[in-house]
Amino acid sequence: MPYKDIEKRREHQRIYAKQHKDKITKYQKRYRIKHRQAFNEYMKRWRNKHKELYTSYLLKNKEAKRRKRLAIRLEIISLLGEKCVKCGYEKNIRALQIDHVNNDGYIERRKLKNSDRLYKHILKQVKNGSKNYQVLCANCNIIKKYKCLDTIIEFPLFNIKKEWYYFILS
Ligand SMILES: [Zn+2]
């Protein structure tokens, strides 16, 4: 039954959208995939037309993402015991870092490409009982990293200070 009154119709649409949120999101996703090029062009035009609004959306989204990432990081740290496994440091959570036990973090980082995906992946692994991760304080983590580099680098390759190699490779 269509509404003649435009306000009533809008109200009806609002209620409908709230009640069928999942259905609408699914439909929109399907539509975007089916008409990808047209949709991208439309979005490009929209972005150019509403530059300021778009920038504000981006900033808002960035902040939300940052908070979410932080929440996931804190959850991982609390699941892993909330203190450094080497020296027992637990005073400030800001100085606690998630460490790959086998020093293979670079493989995961390369594979997953962004830190959001990486943290989600780590959280899932930790929840499944993975032993590949541990919490280290910033000091212990950097010492471990340099020790690991010590075994990789053969000195002297060039006539430069050992510390410079760390700088180049880190
Ligand atoms: Zn420590």
Image (spheres, helix red, strand yellow):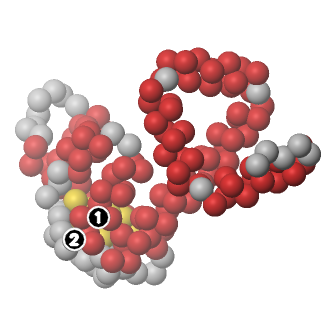
Mark 1 = which residue? Answer: 124
**Residue type at the position of mark 1:** Lys
Q: Is mark 2 on a helix, strand or loop?
A: loop
Q: Distance between the residues labelled 2 and 1?
A: 6 Å
Which amino acid does the dot numbered 2 rest on?
Asn
Nearer to us in this view, 4 or 129: 4
> Total marks drawn?
2
Q: Do the residues labelled 2 and 1 touch (CB within 8 Å)?
A: yes
**Dividing the picture into quarters, in which one does residue 79 lie?**
bottom left
Q: For the point 71% across and 33% down, which residue is it?
A: 54
Q: Is residue 23 left or right of residue 157?
A: right
Numbered label attached to residue 95? none
Name above or below for residue 107 compared with residue 82: above
Tell me residue 160's x, y (percent).
Answer: 22, 31
Report whether residue 127 is seen: yes
- Which residue is nearer to you in this view: 70 or 53? 53
**Of residues 28 and 99, the one drawn nearer to the viewer in this rendering:** 28
x%, y% of residue 19? Answer: 63, 60
Kind of element beneath mark 1: helix
Identified at 71% across, 20% down, the residue is 48
Q: Is residue 53 above or below residue 77?
A: above
**Residue lying at 55% horizontally and 18% vertically, measured from the top left:** 38
Mark 2 — residue?
128
Q: How crowded is mark 1: few (under 14 residues within 10 Å), some or many (20 or more)?
A: few
Please say whether residue 95 is visible from this viewpoint.
no
Q: Is mark 2 within 8 Å of ligand 1?
A: no
